[in-house]
Amino acid sequence: MSGDYLSLLLLFGVSIVNAIGMVVASHILNPRRDTPQKLMPYESGMIPLGTTRARFSVKFYMVAISFIVFDLETIFLIPWAVQMRELGWSAFLAMTMFVIVLAVGLLYEWKKGGLEWD
Amino acid sequence: MELDFSRQLHFFWALLPEIILCTFGMVVLVAGVSGKYKDADKAPSGDPSFGTTADLGWLSLIGVLIAAGANGWLYGVKEVGQDSMIALDHFRLFANWIFLLAAALTILISFAYVYRQRLQAGEFFALILFATAGAMFMAGARDLIVIFLGLEVMSIAVYALTAFNRRDRKSAEAGLKYFLLGAFATGFFLYGIALTYGATGSTNVAVIATSVSSGAATAGLLTIAIALLVIGFSFKVSAVPFHMWTPDVYEGAPAPVTAFMSATVKAAAFIAFARVFLVAFNDSYTTWFPILWWLAAITMVSANLIALVQTNVKRMLAYSSIAHGGYLLLALTAANPTATAGMLFYLLVYTLMNIGAFAIVISVAHQAEERQYIDDYTGFGWTNPALGVFLTIFLLSLAGFPGTGGFMGKIYLLQGAAESELWWLMVILVLTTVASYWYYLRVAWLMWMKNPTSDGQHDLVITPFPMRLALVVCVGLIVYTGIFPGAALEFARASVQGLGAFGGGIVGLAP
């Protein structure tokens, strides 16, 4: 059994040594000429604006939470959809209940005003 | 009717009380944001007991009553075998009575609080119902995964309830603290489940028990798994040294939520604790016996000592609840049918007296979070005699005074411990109980033996009809179980039958 995974372990080992080696080697070998521009925080080539600890409106979190919920719904629905015929009616019933509960959640969010931006 | 769980529909029948609670929770949740209920919290009008916000509370109460009916119906249902994911034994059904009682009482005592604090009634009551359903899942689970699911359903609802009073800083702080520490403890619990699976090859309590007793389980892994599960459960039952969150959360959370939390969360954790350790790890008794012995001893001693110096009533009751957790851990350590029946009886009585005491704390605090200090109770008894007598009964019962349910509960715990010959723990229980008289009776003393510090100090104490109903139920049942404990105890004894093999027949172990 250990033989089966030895190659995998080797792959992990080589990639770790390779990754660390490249960083360390370039750190030792390269010439360092620091300029104020180079010492700036990297923000995709832009000149940084404002502080990092900017506050976001809570609306963004609402969208993010709704996204996660329905993203997870997809994760449950797709495997079931692929195997629907084999799993039969009991799985269909279970999925129906699951979707109903989610629909109630959506209804609640809608009525609460969670889907409105303003 | 017989359920064999090979047909999926049978799970539906076995989970009927939980499903009813969840359905009512969803209905209350959606109703709370529809029509005239949508903005009821912004400008409360009408009567707090029967007005707009109260409708949702009464609806939730109907849900709890129907779930209780379903729970009673389950007594007529038999299960085939003992290894399904959901247990249908009387142990679970007894636990369900405790949760449903706690939920009903909590709903009754929160009407005026929700009204005065302008909380969103729909969400509040729905979360109470969801948390109760989670507790019932936890108690009814015969599989570690289902226990975990129940734990999460219950905990997440309670985290939200703790932070529910969002205009109050303390409530938000308590919610965040509880959430972070709870998530951390859940990690331990989950890791314990994973290692149990690694050691025994199953997450099913019955299969784990077979694996442990036949010696097929990996001993080293199993020991670590047991230790991690003890940590996970100890956090939920707030045993010392995993109790740090309890005083802050109990103090910061809205008072009805504190009442609910101290009863339901603790009871659910103890029931699941008992099922996992007395059934699944029954043959590892020698491994976990010393851990629980020390946890029980440390919890009883330190919680009672710290409670002596508290000045805030909610904090005092928080330490008192930790101390009661210590008494209940004694029953788990004893691990025999008498002690387990005593634990069920004690949990029932504890639910009644704790929710009752918190109900009066809410009244004294003007249905808010205002007057929580012990000094605010001076002369309370003479200005509000009925409430004063009730609070005195609750405090005496918490202290374990003869004639109250709390006394009988402690007697049964001691009886169970005596059967396992845990003499030292029994001595600690008696001594710490004597110490606890000081902090319980100090409140009673201030109430009856001192004059109010100012005129009209207790004028604003409000006790609406639903709260009076809850108080009468609590006092009635506490006095009844204190004087005629036979029926409740027989019921608890019968509920423990068939739970597990118990203790492996080891008596007189020293930690």
Image (spheres, rainbow, N blue to C red):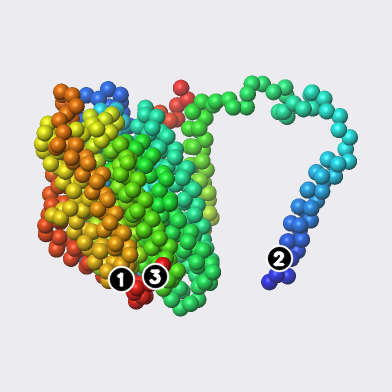
Q: Secondary structure at mark 1?
A: loop
Residue wearing tag 3: B510
Left or right relative to B134: residue B50: left
Crowding at dot 1, Cα within 10 Å, few <14 / some 14-19 / many 20+, comes out as some
For the point 15% across and 24% down, the residue is: B456
Q: Secondary structure at mark 2?
A: helix
**Total number of numbered discs in the rendering:** 3
Q: Secondary structure at mark 3?
A: loop
For the point 49% across and 28% down, the residue is: A58
Q: Which mark is residue B222?
A: none
- As measured in the structure, the alpha-carbon distance from the residue carrying label 2 to the one carrying label 3 is 47 Å
The answer to whether tags 2 and 3 share a subunit is: no
Between circles 2 and 3, the one closer to the viewer is 3
The answer to whether tags 1 and 2 share a subunit is: no
Quadrant for residue A93, please give it: bottom left
Disc 2: host chain = A
Disc 1: host chain = B
- As measured in the structure, the alpha-carbon distance from the residue carrying label 3 to the one carrying label 1 is 10 Å
* Quadrant in which the N terminus of chain A is drawn: bottom right
Residue nearest the observer in this picture, B510 or B133: B510
Residue wearing tag 1: B421
For the point 72% across and 22% down, the residue is: A47
Left or right relative to B122: residue A92: right
Q: Amino acid at mark 3?
A: Ala
Crowding at dot 2, Cα within 10 Å, few <14 / some 14-19 / many 20+, comes out as few
Residue wearing tag 2: A5
Between circles 1 and 2, the one closer to the viewer is 1
Task: Residue B288 in the image: state x and y as whole percent.
Answer: 43, 66
Mark 3 vs mark 1: which is more N-terminal? 1
For the point 12% across and 49% down, the residue is: B476
Q: Are marks 1 and 2 in contact (CB under 8 Å)?
A: no
Q: Amino acid at mark 1?
A: Glu
